[in-house]
Image: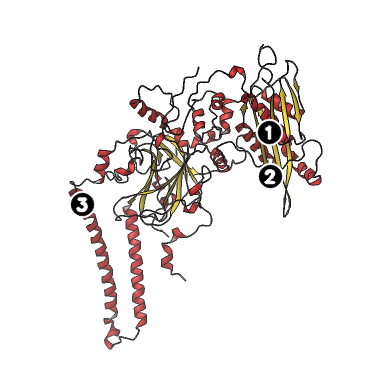
Amino acid sequence: MSKPISNKGKGKNKKKATPDPVLLGFPDGSIDPEQDSDAYSTKIGGVPVWLQSGFAPPAEYLKCGICRQSMYLLFQGYVPLANSIYHRVIYVWACNRRLCMRKEGSFTVVRSHLVDPEYLAAHRKKEEEKRKKEQLKLEQQKKAAQPFGAFQLGDLWGSNTPSFSQAASNAITTSEHDDKSTDTDTLTTTLEKMTLDTQSPSLQEQSQQEIPIVSFPGEYLWITEEDLNNYDAMGIDMERYREYIDMQNTLLEASSEDTTEEGTWGGEAYEKQQLPRGVDKQFKKFAERVQLQPNQCVRYQWGGIPLLYHQLQGHQQQSIRSLGGNCSQCGSSRTFELQLMPNILSLLPTSEYASAELSENNKKKDVNSWDIGMEFGTILVFVCEKDCHPVDIEQPSYVKEHVLVQFEQD
Amino acid sequence: MADSAPADRRGGFGRGRGRGGRGRGRGRRGDEKTEWVPVTKLGRLVKAGKIKNMEEIYTFSLPVKEYQIVDYFLPSLKDEVMKIMPVQKQTRAGQRTRFKAFVVIGDADGHVGLGVKCSKEVATAIRGAIILAKLSVIPVRRGYWGTALGEPHTVPCKVTGKCGSAMCRLIPAPKGTGLVAAPTPKKVLQLAGITDCYTTSRGSTRTLGNFVKATFAAIGNTYGFLTPDLWTETEFTKGPYQEHTDFLAVKQRK
């Protein structure tokens, strides 16, 4: 029998009977570069906007792990979780060099938190009420345990009871006071810290000095649920084959009657389909699913099942639950949250920007460069299951999460 | 549960605080199905117009993973269902019947494809076979029987193809002969664009699945045969993409 109080906060951990539907992100109009300053918008390309302006992640996060050049922002999404007091944003960066592809370190994903004061106040109030309730309960239990223990004549006229209630109310008021004072204390100290620390290289200064910001032109994303209703047609007009389809039942009967067919088409057996080089069954499923809504750029499903680009191979062949590994900060396991689709490569001018960079360096080579810049099949993002916040609650945080990139195979 | 949290927080992903989902562009949903959005490198190159025709893909032997690429270059492909036949598998609970569809596709001008798909329903089998046929489109080399007069009309030399025990041999024929073949390979040769041809076959041609595949293999061998006019040295150019270099220099094609 669990107490009613302890169940309240655990709504998130309850297993749901049906998983959340998959949310898709579609391109929704390009972003005017001057207006690209909203930390709460969901977009591909563009410039990263931090939750707390001036407080950027460490400069190392924005550099490619292989060539040490600055990476381009691929995706920024505002993804708050239910029952969380934090604003939550996920950034995905990628290096735009073909040589860095298919190696670790060319894609980075960072999850950022900033506490929302209203939610924090509400959360704290809830906690306060909880505490009050528990205290009252304890008092009542104590009272019940000693009904006549400290009985004295004088007590009946309220020398004990008022003292109890007074003690309780005192406790409450003092605790409230404490909270308020601690609130203001932490706020003032952090404010003081921010102004006093001009000598040591603070995070925001570092990032602005060392890394040149490069970016693609941005595009807003419009979010909606996945619609799987048109699964049948898939672009081929089946009316031409109506007679064959109608033959289905007659064929069934015919086959069950005579097993040895003479003359023409006898002796056929089930054969597995011959797929061309580089195509496996999982890729076929991927292509079919994407084809239903071909403009999709992002698929979102917290704790869901990713749509793989091809079958996992080698050391990655494990259950999808354990693909993400464990969180680097708190050690809990990681869960799938979202994946980026190849349509992003069709929308963002990756090869133009890569060739522009190259022609500055190699002017003598006359190139008809077709295939430079970044490439991927799909990018899977795994985040900490518990959505940990490794620093003080008031501070914004940046946590590097796990990214699994699937490329095309030959 | 969180009774104090406002309702708009639950949306997650861009819907929180009403700022993420901008709600524009709803009118664009209509054209979603007709447009093809590529999912592979080659698809993106084709869509961007960097590849001029199917022959460039054949030159570099690039694997075609999306059938829309073939549709893009060869819109006039005609497909033909050769046969739907039920095949059976013995299971503990009796026999399980599936349908096997053979589809041949071609534009009667030098491109053919063959697709075989097995499925529980006829419609699925046909659809899958059409897609597989498009993915397997190969070029057909045609030549002359005698004088090089007019357009090529027959196979350039004697070619043969084998599948299982069925063997099919194609022999050049003079203009006006027509296709001297059994009905099944005749259909394949018509779709390939070969107007005149003698054929010889051997083996169990009753297993027409194997026979069709043998004919298809024979047609594919027309470009695999080294004839004296191909003796000149080819200048190898690098393909449109290679895995381990930055970029590639590709000679400008006329």
Measured as percent of width and height from the top left, residue A259 is found at 79, 45
Q: Secondary structure at mark 3?
A: helix
Please report, as a chain letter, where disc 1 is located: B
Give the mark toward the camera: 2 or 1. Answer: 1
Q: Amino acid at mark 2?
A: Lys
Measured as percent of width and height from the top left, residue A70 is found at 33, 37
Q: Relative to B145, is A153 on the left or the right?
A: left
Residue A368, picture quadrant: top left
Give the residue at mark 3: A193
Q: Relative to A407, is B127 on the left or the right?
A: right
The answer to which of B232 and A213 lies nearer the viewer is B232
Give the residue at mark 2: B120
- Dot 2 or dot 1: first in sequence order is 1
Q: CA distance from mark 2 to mark 3?
A: 70 Å
Q: Amino acid at mark 3?
A: Lys
The answer to which of B229 and A181 lies nearer the viewer is B229
Q: Rate crowding at label 1 as few (under 14), some (14 to 19) or many (20 or more) other CA atoms within 10 Å.
A: many
Q: Are marks 2 and 1 in contact (CB under 8 Å)?
A: no
Measured as percent of width and height from the top left, residue B48 is found at 48, 27
Residue B79 in sight in this render: no
Q: CA distance from mark 2 to mark 1?
A: 17 Å
Please report, as a chain letter, where disc 3 is located: A
Measured as percent of width and height from the top left, residue B3 is found at 41, 59
Give the mark toward the camera: 1 or 3. Answer: 1
Q: Relative to A341, is B172 on the left or the right?
A: right
Give the residue at mark 1: B103
The residue at 49%/19% (across/down) is B253
Residue extending furthest toward the bottom: A153
Respond whether the residues carrying marks 2 and 3 are from the same subunit: no
